[in-house]
Image (cartoon, helix red, strand yellow):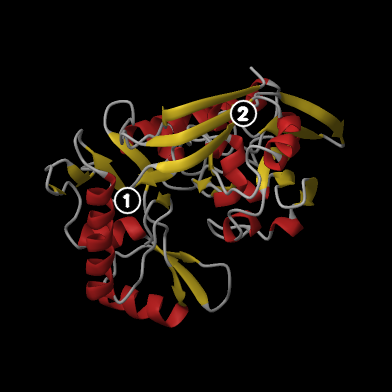
Amino acid sequence: MTVRFAESAPLRNTFGLPARAATLIETDDAADLPALFANELAGASPLVLGGGSNLLFVDDAPLALRLDTQNIRILDTRDDIAIVRADAGVEWHRLVMWSLEQGLAGLENLALIPGTVGAAPIQNIGAYGVEAAERIHAVEAFEPTTGAFHRFDAAQCAFAYRDSLFKRAPDRYLIVAVEFALPTARSVGTAGLKIDYAGIRDAMGLAADARDGYTALDVADAVIRLRRSKLPDPAVVGNAGSFFKNPIVPASLAEASKAAHPTLPVFPGGGDDLRKLSAAWLIDACGWKGHRGGASGDAGVSDKHALVLVNHGRATGAELLALAREIAASVHAHFGVAIEPEPRIVGASW
């Protein structure tokens, strides 16, 4: 396959919603993009698809594009740092495990996150104390309006919490590949591995003061076990993982909230006057965990994790969006804190 066209094509999404595109275009070569946008896609803004793990379809898409590129390779190694280039279509977890097989570290805390490499910089994906931005060396992207390919270094990507240049300008660039700067596991040793976040140490069976005897692969295995124990499998129950971002609030609001609710988790927020709150705790405190409703009765909140909205089988995108809005409204009413969705909403606005 180089370029393939399909009409009324079903669109894969981890919510399990029956979404379709009037026209779906797929290519396995980024070199096809200039010709596509000069001809079939001229003047269009197609929905760019990855693994469908960060999308909530409220309506069908008129036009969709999937870049199904699959290469991973080491571009260079120097001073115990390898520059790894992965195509946008590569499954994220595949990249994580491939890097570990090459004796590289740095992505182990991000194991089992659904989606593709191309989506990772947009959202600046993160988990268990690590963000993708910490390891991204550069992003290669195509600009449809000019027909040009660009290479952005990490600083130019303007990464922030679940945010980036590419998320703020969603139709301007199409990511085609990402380069990662990954240290060799040998150079990192155990001291450079992050295991003191959200139960990783316990999942590894380590004492509180243990500082050796484990590897980056051990960390990845622990993260995989934790994610599987806390998050429902999309193959069984439709979901998009964490639906809401942890809110960043003024330190004064965080301190007042903590004083009123001593068990509320509060984290650094990226600035002296900012704090990050746990959206899961806020939602759980409002009584939403395990909720099930909507016209179908199948739009709900996971009983494993309050951040995860689920489709028990017959829920529509509209039902799930309505539920998300109800949850956000209740959190704001109870705590004065606004929470926002992580997934892109197709066919409606937040």
Position of residue 11 measured from the top left corner of the image (x, y, whole percent): 42, 32
Horizontal side, residue 166 vs residue 221: left or right: right
Task: Residue 205: name its quadrant.
Answer: top left
Viewer-closest of 184 and 9: 9
| SS at circle 2 | helix
Task: Look at the numbered discs 2 and 1 and tell me whether their residues touch, using CB distance below 8 Å.
Answer: no
Mark 1 sits on what residue?
307
Pinpoint residue 268: horizontal percent, then vertical percent. 51, 66
Mark 2 lies on residue: 95
Q: Quadrant of the C terminus?
A: bottom left
Between 187 and 19, the one nearer to me in the picture: 19
Q: Residues within 10 Å of mark 2 (few under 14, many from 20)?
A: many
Q: Is residue 107 left or right of residue 286?
A: right
Circle 1 Cα neighbour tier, 10 Å, few/some/many (<14 / 14–19 / ≥20):
many
- Image coordinates of residue 236 in percent, x first then y, are 27, 26
Residue shown at 33%/26% (left/top)? 235
Position of residue 61 measured from the top left corner of the image (x, y, whole percent): 43, 43
Q: Nearer the viewer, residue 78 or 295?
A: 295
When the figure is inspected, residue 245 is found, relative to residue 220, above or below; the finding is below
Give the residue at x 56% y 31%: 25
Q: Is residue 256 left or right of residue 192?
A: left
Q: Quadrant of the rendered structure where residue 19 is?
A: top left
Residue closest to the eye, 67 or 79: 67
Q: Amino acid at mark 1?
A: Leu
User: In the image as oriented, which residue stretches furthest toward the top?
Assistant: 1
Badge 2 amino acid: Leu
Q: Disc 2 or 1, which lies upstream in sequence?
A: 2
Looking at the figure, which quarter contains the N terminus? top right
Looking at the rendered structure, the secondary structure element under dot 1 is: loop
Residue 240 visible from this viewpoint: yes
Q: Is residue 124 visible?
A: no
